[in-house]
Image (cartoon, coloured by chain):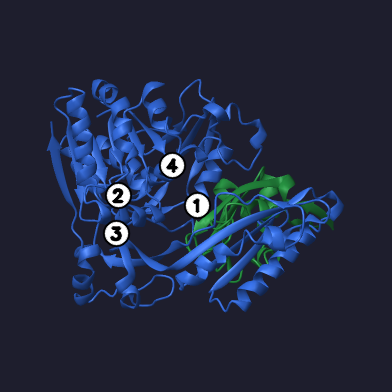
Chain colours: A blue, B green
Amino acid sequence: MKEKIRIASGQGFWGDLIDAPYNQVFRGEIDYLVMDYLAEVTMSILQKQKNKNPELGYARDIPELMKRILPQCKRRNIKIITNGGGVNPISCANAVLDIAQKLNINNLKVAVILGDDILDRIDEIISSGCNLKNMETNEPITIIKDKILSANVYFGAFPIVEALRQGADIVITGRTTDTGLTLAPMIYEFDWGKNDYDLLAAGTVAGHILECGAQASGGNFLGDWKSIPNMADIGFPIAEAYPNGEVIITKHENTGGRVSSETVSEQLLYEIGDPKNYITPDCVADFTSIKLEDLGNDRVRVYDVKGFPETEFYKVSCSYSDGFSASATLTYSWPEALTKAKSADEILRKRLENLNLQFDEIRTEFMGYNACHGPLAKQLDENDINEITLRIAVRSKDYFSVERFGKEIAPLILTGPPSVTGFAGGRPKPSEVVAYWPALIPKKLVQHQVKIFEV
Amino acid sequence: MKKIKLIDIAHGRSGDKGDAANIGIIACDNNGYKILEKYLTADLVKKHFEGICLGKVERFELPNLRALNFVLHNTLGGGGTVSLKLDAQGKTLAAALLRMELEIE
């Protein structure tokens, strides 16, 4: 058994720094590169791409990245784990295998995890007695069934472990928890069992720290953010994991950013609910048990994590089409910038009303004044305001109303308050609103499969 | 009684979970955590976010991280992709909470 393994976070979301995974591979020692590409909205976008072209539906940055890192990863036996397979992990694997062949790489095993995509099984699942009711509203899924765009179960670490045990160099999954990507190599390398809940929780906590990339290593840090060095060359976090469940969070030497108790604490609190019940498919982790020790030199020891048995359910995330929205901005300058922007808003709303358009919501924000903090914004002396950007957004089930809203923005320049600018790029177009339906499904209704492809 | 600015004793991070936002607030030292634990109640947070948080506020304690976690329900205008808010994911709400002043003994 290895004495320790180094697991590197290469991507916090699809659209993160393109060179981050490259730097993780080339600027220091690592054993695993893990990349999270999937936000909830990503699944529906990928499903739409797959509907148009059955070869698509995965994170298309992956083949391009593989061209740059695959020879190096193969040489140094760095394994790659990613959920960037989206709704088409097999096509993603094929694209990676193509690249491998072009680079003359042999003996490469690419594993694909299947079974998370239940879009075609919704009727069957409902008829088996599971009504996939909304976790927040308790409504049955039948009320949105005709509008569903994608439906995926969140798998945990164990399907990936199975793939690693079959010798995979690269594991490509569909919907897998972000934490599972990091936990899996620990289970595999250190032979942790399904009932080693404290260890599974320790790996899960490490996964939570790594899942948003540099948000654990100095990015988006609300503490003394100005003291974070060299954010231009920020190093992404690395979990140095030990068989006893201890993890040291660090980053490559000579990179920017910082790993400290403060930066790690902020990430631990990101997007959590009840800290005693951090539920994953693998275990329930108790975030109130986590101990941190700042070792200095960008090293933080994470230890003593307690865990509990997993639940009998997987979480399901469905996306469905729920109308249309659009937003527009116009910028008003001194003098009386805020008064002008407020006046423009009133004029626009009156016109929309006169046109008898139907909206579920019209929202106005004054950027430079209250867009972020709403009623908490301090009163401003208009003499001190150089400019205000009016931002107005609408949502409706009616496409025509949203489209017409887009046509009413530019006219405000010549038919409303003065000293206005910033309208460029044409009329705002309606975009489809994709809403989410979180639900639970008994684990026994879903079966994962591991497929191995080789060159 | 004296007034203390939250931003002088704490930092934090916020994000979204559906239509709920969570705000993690971390004290800079042990004394700061004692103040947070005693004075920064769910009721105060609910009042602070009047007009923004339309649901209930839950408070969870993480003394191991010198932190409190607040979950603000019905806060993000329908959640991530439905919301018309500029800050649809509640990214700036941690900073918004740090605007608060606490009256302490």
Question: Looking at the picture, do discs 2 and 1 lie on one chain?
Answer: yes
Residue tagged 4:
A15
What crowding class fits label 2: few (fewer than 14 Cα within 10 Å), some (14-19), or many (20 or more)? many
Residue A288 is labelled as 1
Residue tagged 3:
A152
Q: Amino acid at mark 3?
A: Asn
Q: Amino acid at mark 1?
A: Thr
Q: Amino acid at mark 4?
A: Gly
- Name above or below for residue A207 compared with residue B84: above
Q: Amino acid at mark 2?
A: Gly
What crowding class fits label 1: few (fewer than 14 Cα within 10 Å), some (14-19), or many (20 or more)? some
Question: Seen in the image, is A164 located left or right of residue A291?
Answer: left
- Label 2: state its secondary structure: loop
1 and 3 marks in contact (CB < 8 Å): no
**Closer-to-camera residue (A18/A20):** A18
Question: Looking at the picture, do discs 4 and 2 lie on one chain?
Answer: yes
Question: Looking at the picture, do discs 2 and 3 lie on one chain?
Answer: yes
Location of the N terminus of chain A by quadrant is top left
Residue depicted at 41% across the width and 26% down the height: A23
Q: Position of residue A125 (x, y in %)?
A: 21, 71
Question: Looking at the picture, do discs 1 and 4 lie on one chain?
Answer: yes
